[in-house]
Amino acid sequence: MNLPPKVTERAFARLAEINDSGEVRPLRVAVSGGGCSGFQYDIRLDQAEADDLVLEGAGQKVVVDPVSLPYLAGAVIDFADELIGARFVIDNPNASSSCGCGTSFSI
């Protein structure tokens, strides 16, 4: 059995800030084909589906669909606030390489 992805307290806290101003929606973390390295992350506010894995913390939810789950096994979903910008980031042990933008990777 693969380890489920983990979400940091910092990521849940930032999601809480985002959701504080309106409708509370889960953060969807998905993997799709494409990008400069073969796969890319799709991170957006969305609604949970019945077959999603739901990760909860700080009153917030992060959801992962069953197709993306194997690609995110053991990954850490975090929030980074750096000079290049503030964004949700994924530290994925399954990625053999990634591109400079951090949204694309290969296995």
Image (cartoon, helix red, strand yellow):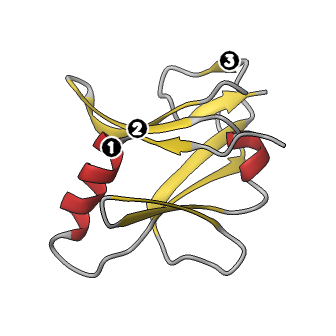
Work out whether mark 1 precedes mark 2 in sequence or the reverse, and give the earlier one.
Answer: 1
Is disc 3 surrounded by few (<14), some (14 to 19) or many (20+) residues within 10 Å? some
Q: Position of residue 79 (x, y in %)?
A: 33, 38
Q: Quadrant of the C terminus?
A: top right
Under tag 2, what secondary structure? strand
Q: Which of the pair 12/84 is nearer the observer?
A: 12
Place residue 58 in its image quadrant.
bottom left
Under tag 3, what secondary structure? strand
State the residue at coordinates (63%, 41%). 40
The residue carrying mark 1 is 9
Q: Which of the pair 38/17 is nearer the observer?
A: 17
The residue carrying mark 2 is 78
Q: Image check: 78 left or right of 22?
A: right
The residue carrying mark 3 is 97
Work out whether mark 3 precedes mark 2 in sequence or the reverse, and give the earlier one.
Answer: 2
Q: Are marks 1 and 2 in contact (CB under 8 Å)?
A: no
Q: Position of residue 34 (x, y in %)?
A: 71, 43
Work out whether mark 1 precedes mark 3 in sequence or the reverse, and give the earlier one.
Answer: 1
Place residue 53 in its image quadrant.
bottom right
Q: Position of residue 22 (x, y in %)?
A: 20, 79
Is disc 2 surrounded by few (<14), some (14 to 19) or many (20+) residues within 10 Å? some
Q: Quadrant of the N terminus?
A: top right
